[in-house]
Amino acid sequence: MEAQAAVATRAFADRLAAAVVERRSQLVVGLDPRLDLLPLELRGDAHTGPEAAATAFSRFCRGLIDAVCPYTVAVKPQSAFFEALGADGVRAFEDVCDYARAAGLLVIGDVKRGDIGSTARAYAAAYLGPRAGQPPVADAITVNPYLGRDSLEPFVAECRRSGRGIFCLVKTSNPGGVDVQDLKLTDGTLVWQQVARLVAELGEGVVGECGLSSVGAVVGATYPRAVSEARRLLPQAILLLLGVGAQGATPADVARAFTSGPASALVSVSRSINYAFRDGEADWRTAAAAEAARLRDEVWRASGW
Amino acid sequence: MEAQAAVATRAFADRLAAAVVERRSQLVVGLDPRLDLLPLELRGDAHTGPEAAATAFSRFCRGLIDAVCPYTVAVKPQSAFFEALGADGVRAFEDVCDYARAAGLLVIGDVKRGDIGSTARAYAAAYLGPRAGQPPVADAITVNPYLGRDSLEPFVAECRRSGRGIFCLVKTSNPGGVDVQDLKLTDGTLVWQQVARLVAELGEGVVGECGLSSVGAVVGATYPRAVSEARRLLPQAILLLLGVGAQGATPADVARAFTSGPASALVSVSRSINYAFRDGEADWRTAAAAEAARLRDEVWRASGW
């Protein structure tokens, strides 16, 4: 019991840093289950209703976890796809998170939550706080900064209390991200750069023994210059880099994110691993494993560690 | 069946406008169930686990809905408090939404979602899209604009398709809202004013027969000058005004929001109605009904309609 308690309160950043070195991987596999893209053998009666679909999602994600486990440090289940099935889907989300944890992987819940006061505390408790007799649903979650510092502080407090982490959206990978994030301020900086400063400040209170903070930042690998600039503004943050694969960025685009250490950035890839089987004849698990292995090696080499 | 289909695709703005006039109310009652604040009679074994707690949340919210129904046009269940109970809580959230709809109220799901591409489409489908044999979970939801136009468009598309609405965070009621929303741009405007322009543009495609758009905006009543400015920037939007009651704003602070018509703004109040019983000796339902009736009248008078 004591050992368990000690593990639970070890800083997220330290747990992640250890896992990166041990597994020689900075790859995060996103889990994006979609009914219309599932392998044929899992479709079965999945179209008959949310309960059957949720079971199919669980089986798909569990199979992916088994397949990619040797090559990845974390999985990032995308909550939206599970929420689309209602409460049954949320049950499957919890199942997938628990399964990944039992397989020795860290879990980054891609929920992009953000709210104020007691509501933010409820979200923090929902995903990062201990459950009755069980560890939290996730080791870290993604959060949205639009509501400002007081909306993020409850998450940071939970990170400190429970040894968890957050990745705050800073500069996202999508074209429309510029609409708000790239607005130019009177001092010549951009909105996302101010958000990066806010994230850096919030992260100061939760720096682990490894020198990295448990408050990280989401940055789009589709903007290589922004990656370099984010690294400069957030020297202690773990950067969660999105957009490699389906969105067109390559591991080489993110090399400069790793200058703060081997675990100072993570590359998250979803679709090109989840649905690798659609490009060939291989079994879906085999195809996912091969693509994860390839990306793990490519990112590790690009990181220069 | 045909009548049902017609109802389902009638624009959210038109359904809301009709309800406001019919009920002579612009009051939205937020539903924020919290274990530590529940009426004694509902606590029972609610602390024994998420399933029992979710049952207590359902009973509390159903009781509130019955009590405030004559005085309100919509309820706004806060997803975070339900999500804190995991899948059991999400089941209760769905139950509460269905119960409110059956009582003749509109349902604004306070979920503050925001994501990109297929993920945004999944969120839109989860809350605004039809379920197998059932109407959507909510009539409208709150969304977050940090990821820009392409993150909001899938929600707008679902609004058009299913006769639903969204309320985009624009200028929020909390003190920290200024950290991002009030950053000053090179043209002298603030970030939230740019977001308001984006919301106005997105809303142009879903203007109902009543002249109001199904794309609305969340504005903090705690900033009365921002309310007036938001009204100017968003002449066709329904403004969802937060912060009246527990956060200190009064109905008088929001009077200028109503210049685009009686349904052009809604005042959402949560805690001071949900927990009105804690200030006196009355039954929790009686206390909530009295506070809702009082606020409904006060807002209607302040609106000048």
Image (tube, coloured by chain):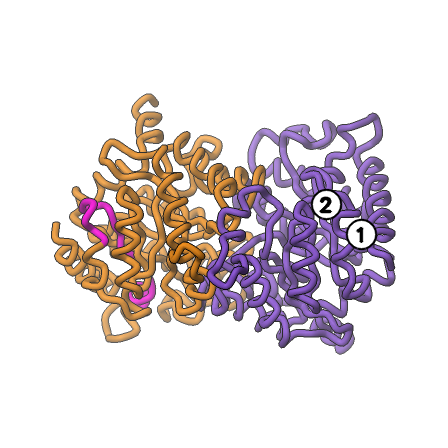
Chain colours: A purple, B orange
Q: Are marks 2 and 1 in contact (CB under 8 Å)?
A: no
Q: Quarter of the image holding residue A287?
A: top right
- Three-letter amino acid code at disc 1? Thr
- The answer to which of A127 and B303 lies nearer the viewer is B303
The amino acid on which the numbered mark 2 sits, given as a three-letter code, is Val
Instruction: Please name the residue shown 45% across and 64% down the image.
Output: A116
Q: Position of residue B236 (x, y in %)?
A: 27, 42
Residue A129 screen position, x and y as percent: 60, 67
| Mark 1 chain | A
| Residue B136 numbered mark, or none | none
In which quadrant of the rendered view does residue B17 lie? Answer: top left
Query: Residue B268 magenta-drawn?
Result: yes
Does residue A284 sit above or below A226 in this rendering? above
Marks 2 and 1, Cα distance to the nearest angstrom? 10 Å
**Depth check: A54 or A202 in front?**
A202
Rate crowding at label 1 as few (under 14), some (14 to 19) or many (20 or more) other CA atoms within 10 Å.
many
Identify the disc placed on residue A269: 2
Q: Secondary structure at mark 1?
A: loop
Label 2 vs label 1, nearer the camera: 2
- Give coordinates of residue B63: x percent, y percent: 31, 57
Q: Residue at x 54, y 60 (%)?
A: A189
Q: Nearer the viewer, residue A86 or A81?
A: A81
Mark found first going from the N terminus, 2 or 1: 1
According to the picture, the residue beneath numbered tag 1 turns out to be A72
Would residue A121 be found to the left or right of residue A200 on screen? Answer: left
Q: Chain of mark 2?
A: A
Q: Tell me if residue B267 is in the magenta stretch.
A: yes
Q: Is residue B157 left or right of residue A216?
A: left
Q: Which residues are magenta?
A: B257-275
Quadrant containing the N terminus of chain B in the rendered view? top left
Q: Is residue A262 above or below residue A221?
A: below
